[in-house]
Image (cartoon, rainbow, N blue to C red):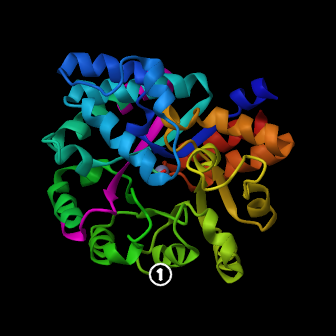
Amino acid sequence: MKTWLRDLPKVELHLHIEGSLEPELMFTLAERNGVSLPYATVDEARAAYDFKDLQSFLDLYYQGMGVLHTEQDFFDLAMDYFSRAAAEGVVHVELSFDPQAHMSRGVALSVPFAGLERAMREAENRWDMTSALIMSFLRDRSADEAMAVLEQAAPYHAQIAAVGLDSAELGNPPSKFAAVFERAKALGLPRVAHAGEEGPATYILEALDVLDVCRIDHGVACLQDEALVARLRDVQMPLTVCPLSNVRLKVVETMTAHPLPAMLDKGLKVTINSDDPAYFGGGVLDNFIACADAFDWDRETFKALAANAIDVAFMPEPRRAELQQRLASG
Ligand code: HPA
Ligand code: ZN
């Protein structure tokens, strides 16, 4: 099953590129840029990745990305992830990044855009891996700041597939960003948002009704509200679920307790993703394998999940048809 899952053409829709920073590269970049780390060794860093909730993870996630300074750093970060993803059978990835977390450290907005864009082109040349970029806003910072970043990013709007919303969810409802997302919509930019990870089902409703998103990142809290589940099912709203992340951030207790099987039973448009692979115990293949171990799903179920991701990805139609064909004939 593991070899079969590796060879399955997988599309990853929920991946924070800063969360793909493995401790090995963190140490390399820390040395390159003269940044001091709170860990003496790679093993010590990994041992610190023991989270009690989303915020305890975010604290280390923002600290870790402090080693990223130059365009080359962002290129190296993305290439490190792409090379692992290629070996895992990932054929298309939608990577999100957090410009505010870099700008607040004095890194110009142009720097991540240039480094990530160069890596995306290189991944396509090297591995035929296509990709799309999502510019995410930090919901625990002000809406005014997000609006300013959106406007400042005007030279790059053609480079992004969508805008997103991430970081600390509780107390930062989607409605806080109504004006920002309205502006993004007016600019013709598709919208996605984290909702219903630690936050309640009402945040998912707000993401739909106020932000007019075309997919929900996580969304596992939808099960608190049967009417919402029916609505998500009826419109086949994509949910980018990240099972290992949910376990590591204590959104669920164990993999076997994860609501993914219930979500599938209810007819929801579910996809499987890694979120922050360097921090949560593996990439998209590891997430598929964890599901195989926990749920005993057959090949048809995994194929349906992989097909869902291809269906809703930001990609040109000929590429979508090619990947669906590859999946069907595998
Ligand atoms: N949730 C919210 N924000 C994030 C995450 C996450 O899992 N990873 C990186 N930013
Ligand atoms: Zn996420």
Amino acid type shown at disc 1: Asp
Residue 323 spot, x, y in % from top left: 63, 40
- Using the image as rendered, state which of residue 176 and residue 234 is in the foreground: 176
Residue at 38 percent across and 53 percent down: it is: 161
Instruction: Tell me if mark 1 has few (under 14), some (14-19) or many (20+) residues whose alpha carbon lies within 10 angstroms of its own.
Output: few
Answer with the quarter of the image where residue 45 lies.
top left
Position of 133 with respect to 220 (left or right) is left
Residue 168, given in percent of the width and then of the height, sits at: 40, 59
Q: Quadrant of the C terminus?
A: top right
Task: Indicate the quadrant containing the N terminus: top left, top right, bottom left or bottom right.
Answer: top right
Q: Is residue 21 left or right of residue 223?
A: left
For the point 48% across and 48% down, the residue is 316
Query: Up-down: is 8 above or below 58?
Result: above
Mark 1 CB in 8 Å range of ligand 1? no
Residue 165: horizontal and vertical position, in percent?
39, 60
Which region is colored magenta? Answer: 120-144
Query: Which of 36/99 is in front?
Result: 36
Q: Where residue 72 appears, x then y in whole percent?
A: 24, 24
Foreground of the two, 280 or 113: 280
Q: Residue at x 77, y 44 (%)?
A: 302
Q: Is residue 131 magenta?
A: yes
Q: Is 6 included in the stretch rendered in magenta? A: no
Location of residue 91 with respect to 87 vertically, above or below: below
Name the residue beneath numbered marker 1. 209
The answer to whether residue 314 is visible is no
